[in-house]
Amino acid sequence: MLPRGRGHRSQFPSFYKGRGGRIPIIQHGNKKLFKENITGIDQLEDNPELFQKVQEYLNSKKDNEGTSSSWANKVQGSTSYAEAITSSEDREKYIPSPFKDIIVFLETHDLRWEKEPWKLMQRYMDTASYAAPSYKRRIFYEEFLTSMGASQSELYNWRGSGMSVMEMSHRGKEFLSIIQKAESDLRSLLYIPPDYTILFLQGGATTQFAAAPLNLCSSPTDAVDYIVTGSWGDKAFKEAAKYCNPKSIWSGKSDKYTKIPNFDSLNQTPGAKFLHICANETIHGVEFKSYPTPAGQKEVLVADMSSNFCSKPVDVTKFGMIYAGAQKNVGPSGVTIVIIRSDLIGYAQAITPVMLDYKIHADNNSLYNTPPCYGIYMCGLVFEDLVEQGGLAEVEKKNVRKGSLLYDAIDGSKGFFRCPVEKSVRSLMNVPFTLAKPELEAEFVKEAAKEKMVQLKGHRSVGGMRASIYNAMPLAGVEKLVAFMKDFQARHDHA
């Protein structure tokens, strides 16, 4: 029998490979060692890309280090998953399965820390896809290897450079290759023409509420039009008043921000420098499905796309400028992306701070000061993954499917759940809904949390619930929420 608990000395020593021996491949108290061999791995029906890569790696090591030994052969008295894990772990997660040989294969080889299949397996076995059909297992591995594996394996050593991206000089050749690749993939995703400039900035989209009028209006008296469809559009409008002469030509406030205007009825201001919209309102769940055309010849369309950026194809040429915080769909917080027609750069007001001047950032290729290097690197990995998925048209199909599933459940609940947003402009990213019995909302959030569905409480300004189903949310997550909603209704919908 294996020793139990972290406080006991184990007969199986921990393996440490990597910098200073700090990266454990098999950690003390977290072992899953099995008494069986790993023959026949090549004959397994489910042998996705991950295992092929691991096998190639192992084969490349044999010439230098000899044949990798199997720790499985050294385990005594362990005949099942339940016996192999320590008492401090959740045994129910590791029930026997037809593909346990794969787990043994990954865990019982001496793998270098750069590959980190142990962490891959740890992440994999914590997911609901553990007992899923072969197709789902394969998709999980391949998607995880693409989107997460690189950042994990390169965390301490980017491409053999000996440095983490977090340690790099932002002017060094290594980071230059990272930011250039990120820009190239983003251009490919959105078909961004060469006469548009891409900037990787900081400060979030909120900073762009000021930067846009400062750069696009040469005078504080210049007129600008705003369509206000929610809280973020309203914030942008109010901030602009400090730097130009903005006019709200339409506001959905009287309808509690549940609709978008008829574009033909807009009374645009003659000579306005730009027309501003928030493409997707996260709080109210309102999304533009098409875009208005500015009235004047020199007027351009400017859009805050923070919460639906890279969720669907967009014709960039319809816009003078697009800006987006990265944190919803393409990376961690701290990166702000600006896509601007190049001929609009260079006319900033004299009062524009250096860090808000697009020309300064464009002239320095987004490297005027130290940028959020690791955040840009992560964005680059996401762009690469979106390209490999087939582009934004394929991403949109997935998002439509998720959104339709959730909205159908709400509309089919016979009024138990309600979405206040006009159907034609419902967001595919943020789905707000309420209960017919408001007194049940707190219980809904509480019970959902017990099922590991969190952050469903609506924004404090509107109440109710809100399900954010960004690109990274899998269909299975939406399916789980819908199943929970139906069960909750069955238990609480008493006439």
Image: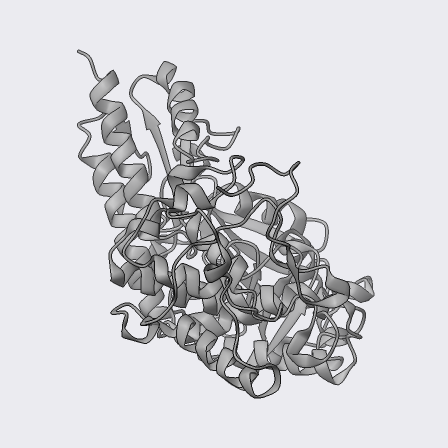
Q: x and y percent of residue 56 in the render?
A: 46, 81
Horizontal arrangement in the rendering, residue 231 relative to residue 39 (left or right): right
Q: In the displayed orientation, state which residue is furthest to the top.
A: 495
Q: How is the image coloured?
A: one colour
Q: x and y percent of residue 180 in the render?
A: 62, 81
Q: Is residue 109 above or below residue 188?
A: above
Q: x and y percent of residue 317 in the render?
A: 46, 76
Residue 344 lies in quadrant = bottom right
Horizontal arrangement in the rendering, residue 489 relative to residue 175 (left or right): left
Q: Residue at image x 53%, y 28%? A: 460
Q: x and y percent of residue 202 in the render?
A: 70, 60
299 or 101: nearer the viewer: 101
237 or 184: nearer the viewer: 184
484 or 263: nearer the viewer: 484
Q: Is residue 494 above or below residue 343?
A: above
Q: Residue at image x 36%, y 48%? A: 427
Tell me how many marks there are.
0
Horizontal arrangement in the rendering, residue 299 relative to residue 435 (left or right): right
Q: Is residue 321 in sight in this rendering?
A: no
Q: Residue at image x 43%, y 39%? A: 284
In the rendered image, the quadrant that contains the C terminus is top left
341 or 173: nearer the viewer: 173
Q: Is residue 273 above or below residue 481?
A: below
Q: Is residue 227 in sight in this rendering?
A: yes
Q: Is residue 81 above or below residue 415?
A: below
